[in-house]
Structures are given as structure tokens and as C-alpha cells.
Image (cartoon, rainbow, N blue to C red):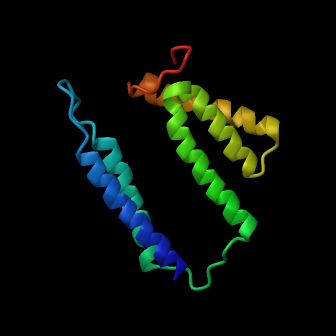
Amino acid sequence: MSDRVLGGVGLTLAVFYAWAATIIPEPFASDAIGPDGFPMIIAVILGLSSLYFVLKPDPEPKWPSLNRLAEIGFAVLIMFGYAEVLPVFGFVFATIIITAYLTWRLGARPLTAILNGVGTSVGLFVLFELIFGLSLADGPLGF
């Protein structure tokens, strides 16, 4: 039952995300995909993944302990905080912080988590900003 609830929440979120993507104003000079292309891809992936949980739920799901649930809830709050500090710190620094934190909470040692955060952030910056030409949030140092 809990998998179906998760799938239902995911489907609802996918529909909302797709709807929100359609109301993004299109700039004067836009590429062939448009500003809603990437969010629509994410919405489709989320919808299909959620549909799997609805159609093929785990017959005996194991719920984490209350400590783990609280930690998952805190990680979700951190993700909302990431969205808030992204325009202030910029993509690179905000992504280093959140990736290092989440990696550390998943069991990595602190130095490994920091290195993972730096590598992930720089890698995503190179991929999206330099290769795909997307505009990511600039930080106080201009990147």
C-alpha cells in the first residue's frame, strides 16, 4: 500500500511539474526545444517511475526507523534550502554544499564527501554550462 501511495504522490507531482513547465514564458530568442523541454522530460521520467510503483508495489515493504524518516525529512528540507540559496551562492558553491552534505549523510567520510561535492558540482557545471550552453545561477565570483 505504501508504494502505491508513493506512486500516487509522484504521479501528482509529475502532473503538477508538467503543468508548471507549460506556463514558463517563452523568451524572444529560444532554441528548438523551448524553455519547457527539460522540465517536461523530468516530468515524464517522474511520471513513468511513479507509475511503476502504482502498478508493481512491493508486497512487503520495509519502512525505515523513525530516526531514518526524520533524516529523510531533513534531507528534503535541505533540498528546499538549496533552491533558496542557489541564486545567492550560485550553482557551483550551493551544489558543493548540498552534495557534500547528502554524501556525508549517506555514509561517506567527511573528506570523501567534500571531494565528491566538488567533483559533482564542477562536473555538472562543465556539462550544463560549458557543453550544453545552459545558464546556471552565478555566484558571487561570477560562476
Is residue 81 depicted above or below 67 in this figure?
A: above
- Point out the residue furthest to the left here: 28
Q: Position of residue 124 (x, y in %)?
A: 53, 32
Along the horizontal axis of the image, is 31 left or right of 39?
A: left
Is residue 8 depicted above or below 117 in this figure?
A: below
Residue 122 visible, this orientation: no
Is residue 111 depicted above or below 133 in this figure?
A: below
- Point out the residue furthest to the top here: 141
Q: Position of residue 86 (x, y in %)?
A: 52, 32
Along the horizontal axis of the image, is 102 left or right of 85?
A: right
Total residue callouts: 0
Q: Residue at x 17, y 25 (%)?
A: 28
Q: Residue at x 78, y 46 (%)?
A: 108
Q: Position of residue 51 (x, y in %)?
A: 40, 70
Residue 37 visible, this orientation: yes
Depth order, front residue of 117/137:
137
Which of the 4 quarters of the picture holds residue 15? bottom left
Q: Position of residue 23 (x, y in %)?
A: 23, 45
Q: Residue at x 53, y 46 (%)?
A: 80
Which of the 4 quarters of the picture holds residue 16? bottom left
Along the horizontal axis of the image, is 53 left or right of 23?
A: right
Q: Residue at x 59, y 50 (%)?
A: 77
